Image: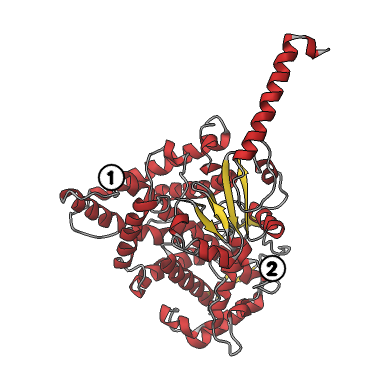
Amino acid sequence: MDFSNTSLGLDIWTFLVIFLVFVVVSLLIRKPRNLPPGPWGWPLLGYLPQLAVSRVPTYEALSELGLRYGPVCSFYLTNQLVVVLQDFDVIKKALALHQLSGRPTFEICQKSLPGHGVVSASGKEWEELRRFSVTTLRSLGMAKSSYEKQISTEAQCLMEEIRKIGGRKFDLRCAMESATANVVCSVLFGKRFEYTDERFIELLQISDDIIEIAGAGGVLEFIPMFSKLTFLPIVKRQIEVNNRLMAFIKDILEDHDTGYEPGSSRDYIDAFYNEMRQKESQGLPTYLNTNSLYYTIAGLFSAGAGTSASTLRWAILYMVAYTEIQKRVQDELENIVGRDRLPQLSDKPKLPYTQAVLSEIQRVGCIAPLSIPHRCLEDTAVSGYHIPKGALIVPNLWQVCYDDTEWTNPREFKPERFLDEEGNFRARDHFVPFGIGRRVCLGENLAKMELFIFFTFLLHQFTFESPEGATGVSFEPKGGITLGPVPYKIRAIPRA
């Protein structure tokens, strides 16, 4: 059919001309001068199709872009500019800038409850919430050895659960997640849960769902147009999970209110209420409100519980695979701690090999490969490139952990990387398991205590083995916003 001689033909040609003009104009508009280099993208969709069909995980795909375009590269996802930082020195300098300390709006979460917490807030709101949180967590003992007793008690509860299994094969995941979650619950809620508590099991399931969904959706969470597509299964499911989480926190706060006494500080919630009500009574402006408390609890719990559990599950998996390393850790514990008591934080400086093993586990496990994206608050420059306001900033921490210019044979598990020539533990600048810059993990000190105590308690009391008949160990991570090992089964043999 000759479309040029019909009104339909005119409509089609008109549409094509308009579409081509739109594409050209959008490309011109979307390529400001001196943006970081990057790959081409499709009209309307940007680089999204290429990422969606990539045969490797997103963090590895971004590392490949770094090899082609350099340590700072960029692309569009629909109309959202994304800037990826690939190099340690670049990331360190960039994330120290106030201009890059913002967070993107968690668009889908806002459908459950408007507001932000300390993890998701930006600007003055974030500064107040972080200042309060740092002060409160320090006063609760999170940065001191005084919190050691609570962590040690929970570690012993975990070991008791393992002893009940009697050396049979089992999956450590549920017990480990329960134990690490209880550490965070003690700080936030002032209580721990029995591992069989139905509400607690529901909380752990919600946490797992959030990690899985966030990994599946990736940065789509931060792109406004996708949050409006509520008919998409991934968006519908995320809204449903967020609603369940907020309902759980509401129940916790209602229970907590029954025992609250103004001025008391049993836990983080008490301290938040005290600060909020004091400022309200004095007529002082504040970002502390009920909604910000909801989101702060959600953020601190999700960031604290799941990451520690995943790290410890990696730790046990590596000990099963590298039995000689497990034996060497146990020998070091035997020499320093002995058999008459359990390890203590004060033993840590005398256990350099144990520290090195834990550090190498965190490096190869790389729990948060892309961290949480930042948002550019105002026009700035990074490594000579223009970064416009509103750009999404993604630090590729996986590339830092696997940079072969810093780590020889980075895919090899080698604790000696963290030992000097005399066998003393040595810190490494490129070792950043808790992030870097102005938004470094709030719970870093708690997590360090928790990982050391749980790991040393477990290896002091048990030897971990593969079940009889098991064929090899898989280090393939389970996808999600954080990387944990795929489910595995082991045997825990009590040590005499």
Which residue sits furthest bottom? 422
Q: Residue at x 27, y 54 (%)?
A: 272
Which residue sits furthest front? 33
- Could you say which is closer to the camera, residue 451 or residue 13? 13
Q: Residue at x 30, y 65 (%)?
A: 140
Which residue sits furthest left? 282
Query: What label sits on residue 411 in the rendered view?
Result: 2
Query: What label sits on residue 10 in the rendered view?
Result: none
Q: Amino acid at mark 1?
A: Glu
Could you tell me residue 69's position as x and y percent? 69, 56
- Could you say which is closer to the camera, residue 88 or residue 29? 29
Q: Is residue 239 visible?
A: yes
Upstream in sequence: badge 1 or badge 2: 1
Could you give the CA–CA distance between mark 1 and mark 2, rounded to whole angstroms? 48 Å
- Could you say which is closer to the camera, residue 322 or residue 432? 432
**Mark 1 crowd level (few <14, some 14–19, many ≥20, 10 Å Cα):** few
Disc 1 secondary structure class: helix
Could you tell me residue 188's position as x and y percent? 34, 57
Could you tell me residue 494's position as x and y percent? 54, 73
Please report contact status of discs 1 and 2: CB closer than 8 Å, yes or no. Answer: no
Image quadrant occupied by the N terminus: top right
Give the residue pinned by disc 1: 254
Q: Amino acid at mark 2?
A: Arg
452 on left or right of 48: left
Question: Is 273 above or below relative to 172?
Answer: above
